[in-house]
Image: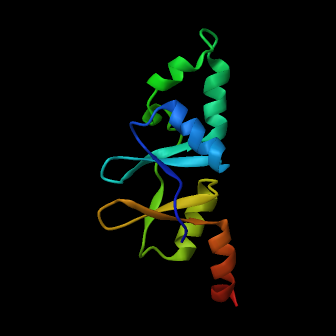
């Protein structure tokens, strides 16, 4: 499990763009004040929204759009006790590079990605 990329649900679109570009990330989880994942934002979806904006291309309008409105995918998650094989199956079924891991209270504590699967799964297969 590795650290998740996340942003608060009330962060602005500008903050989303800054986080994605400064860290060279392709997605972010949007989390509530309690740390529960509310969804995912993909960089491509943000670019589509910007491209569709035909009036007032200044940055001011981006400050008023909360991250929650940019969510393009539901928060597909697993718990700490979910078998790795099941997490991998969910990633394949939903075409995800990573899947969020939540604790017993539903707070996002990490992610399992393809790199984790590549390191751990051969041990189960062999």
Q: Nearer the viewer, residue 54 or 73?
A: 54
The image quadrant where one finds the C terminus is bottom right
From this view, report whether residue 71 is shown above or below residue 118.
Answer: above
Q: Position of residue 57 (x, y in %)?
A: 63, 14
Expressed as whole percent of the image width and height from the top left, the position of residue 82 reads 45, 73
Residue placed most toward the observer, 7 or 106: 7
Displayed quadrant of residue 89: bottom right
Question: In this rendering, is residue 45 above or below 111?
Answer: above
The residue most toward the top is 55
Quadrant of the snapshot with the N terminus: bottom right
Residue 30 quadrant: top left
Which residue is rendered at x = 63% and y = 24% of the image? 50
Residue at 59%, 53% (x, y): give it.
Answer: 94
Q: Is residue 29 left or right of residue 27?
A: left
Q: Nearer the viewer, residue 113 or 7?
A: 7
Residue depicted at x 39% and y 36%? 10
Work out whether 30 lies above or below 51: below
Tell how many labels: 0
| Colour scheme shown | rainbow
Q: Residue at x 36, y 59 (%)?
A: 107
Q: Position of residue 38 (x, y in %)?
A: 41, 46
């Amino acid at each position: 499990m590795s650290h998740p990329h996340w942003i608060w649900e009330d962060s602005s679109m500008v903050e989303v763009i800054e986080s994605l570009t400064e860290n060279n990330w392709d997605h972010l989880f949007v989390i509530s004040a309690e740390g529960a994942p509310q969804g995912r934002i993909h960089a491509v979806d943000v670019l589509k929204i910007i491209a569709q904006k035909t009036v007032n291309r200044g940055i001011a309008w981006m400050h008023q759009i909360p991250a929650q409105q940019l969510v393009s995918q539901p928060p597909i998650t697993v718990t700490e006790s979910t078998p790795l094989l099941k997490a991998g199956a969910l990633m394949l079924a939903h075409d995800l590079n990573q899947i969020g891991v939540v604790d017993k209270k539903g707070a996002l504590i990490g992610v399992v990605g393809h790199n984790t699967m590549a390191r751990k799964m051969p041990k189960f297969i062999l």
